[in-house]
């Protein structure tokens, strides 16, 4: 792995394979034990720095660090000095003074985690930067799909909903393609990025396309990023054309959603409660995958440091 995980493109196919294997072999089963903790990252310090709302990502990163025995500090921007006007740079320099090993960062602005990486010696993991990327979401989705389908090569997925404002879509389109999957985007024109074709995915404007895929990946309408503008003529109309229910699916199709789910907007109630969706498996996968990322980002760079440091004359204990 690279020093930082800022974009899904920071990961090679080999990184994908080894991270997913570590998550499966070493960490998935830990949740089944009575004692859900290993000493792997004892003495390491992780700071989770969240400037945007989060349930799944923040709890899973916190739990992942704790189950690896690291010291974990959670900073929420609304209760930190950011609310008193401190700049992002000053906040990062302040936290860096504690010499953390990893900073996990979520921020409303694209590129904020990369900016942080330039001002800290810690590894930085992007936990979602505005409309930018959400690489660990992609990893956990690929992990969930591998658990459900095995080999992903040639598997067809339709990503449906507010693709324009979705960092999950941006990471997942690239990540799914890296795994050899075929990606279709299904959305009204107003919710697609300009030059969406350049992303290498086929574009559709109707749920009819769901008949041609094995996997349906639903996205939430990101109202907090619409800032008063109308990206669809009306929400009622959007729901009538793009809200997915069991009636749109055929036997064996699986539905994923990163959460939080807006019932009755992108997903019908009955589908949200049905075993056709992998939503809770995704949450479970998120913990194992984030443990793997925290572990590998430290271990891999320690291995590089060892390789490049030459022969040792003294042993430090
Ligand atoms: C996603 C996010 O924050 O980008 N949620 C998540 O991390 N589980 C998707 C969303 O908020 O819709």
Image: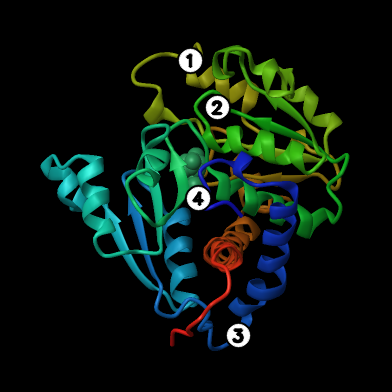
* Crowd tier of the residue under label 2, counting other residues whose Cα lies within 10 Å: few below 14, some 14–19, many 20 or above: many
Instruction: Name the N-terminal-most of marks 4 and 3.
Output: 4
Q: Position of residue 250 (x, y in %)?
A: 84, 40
Please name which of the two marks, 3 or 1, marks the residue nearer to the observer: 3
Q: Are marks 2 and 1 in contact (CB under 8 Å)?
A: yes
Instruction: Name the N-terminal-most of marks 2 and 4.
Output: 4
From the image, which quarter does the N terminus lie in?
bottom right
Mark on residue 4? 4
* Crowd tier of the residue under label 4, counting other residues whose Cα lies within 10 Å: few below 14, some 14–19, many 20 or above: many
Q: Are marks 1 and 4 in contact (CB under 8 Å)?
A: no
Q: CA distance from mark 3 to mark 2?
A: 38 Å
* Crowd tier of the residue under label 1, counting other residues whose Cα lies within 10 Å: few below 14, some 14–19, many 20 or above: some
Q: Label 3: which residue? A: 33
Q: CA distance from mark 2 to mark 4?
A: 28 Å
Mark on residue 162? 2
Q: Secondary structure at mark 3?
A: loop
Q: Label 1: which residue? A: 231
Q: Is mark 1 within 8 Å of ligand 1?
A: no
Q: Position of residue 110 (x, y in %)?
A: 42, 32
């Amino acid at each position: 792995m690279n020093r930082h995980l800022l974009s899904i493109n920071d990961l090679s196919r080999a990184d994908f394979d080894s991270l997913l294997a570590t998550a499966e072999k070493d960490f998935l089963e830990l949740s089944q034990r009575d004692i859900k903790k290993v000493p792997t990252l004892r003495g390491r310090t992780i700071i989770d720095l969240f400037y945007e709302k989060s349930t799944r990502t923040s709890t899973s990163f916190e739990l992942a660090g704790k189950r690896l025995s690291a010291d974990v500090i959670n900073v929420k921007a609304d209760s930190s000095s950011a609310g008193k006007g401190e700049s992002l740079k000053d906040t990062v320099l302040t936290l860096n003074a504690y010499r953390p090993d990893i900073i996990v960062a979520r921020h409303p602005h694209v590129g904020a985690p990369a900016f942080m990486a330039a001002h800290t010696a810690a590894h930085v993991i992007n936990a979602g930067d505005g409309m930018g990327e959400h690489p660990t979401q992609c990893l956990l989705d690929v992990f969930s799909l591998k658990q459900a389908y095995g080999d992903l090569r040639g598997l067809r997925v339709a990503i449906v909903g507010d693709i324009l404002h979705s960092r999950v879509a941006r990471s997942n389109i690239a990540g799914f393609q890296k795994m050899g999957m075929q990606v279709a985007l299904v959305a009204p024109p107003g919710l697609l990025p300009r030059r969406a074709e350049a992303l290498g995915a086929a574009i559709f404007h109707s749920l009819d396309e769901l008949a041609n895929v094995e996997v349906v990946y639903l996205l939430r309408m990101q109202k907090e990023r619409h800032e008063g503008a109308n990206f669809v003529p009306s929400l009622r109309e959007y729901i009538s054309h793009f809200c997915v229910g069991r009636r749109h699916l055929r036997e064996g199709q699986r539905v994923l959603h990163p959460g939080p789910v807006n019932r009755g907007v992108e997903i019908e109630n009955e589908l949200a409660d049905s075993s056709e969706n992998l939503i809770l498996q995704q949450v479970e996968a998120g913990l194992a995958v984030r443990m793997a990322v925290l572990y590998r980002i430290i271990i891999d760079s320690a291995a590089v440091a060892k390789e490049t440091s030459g022969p040792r004359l003294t042993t430090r204990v």
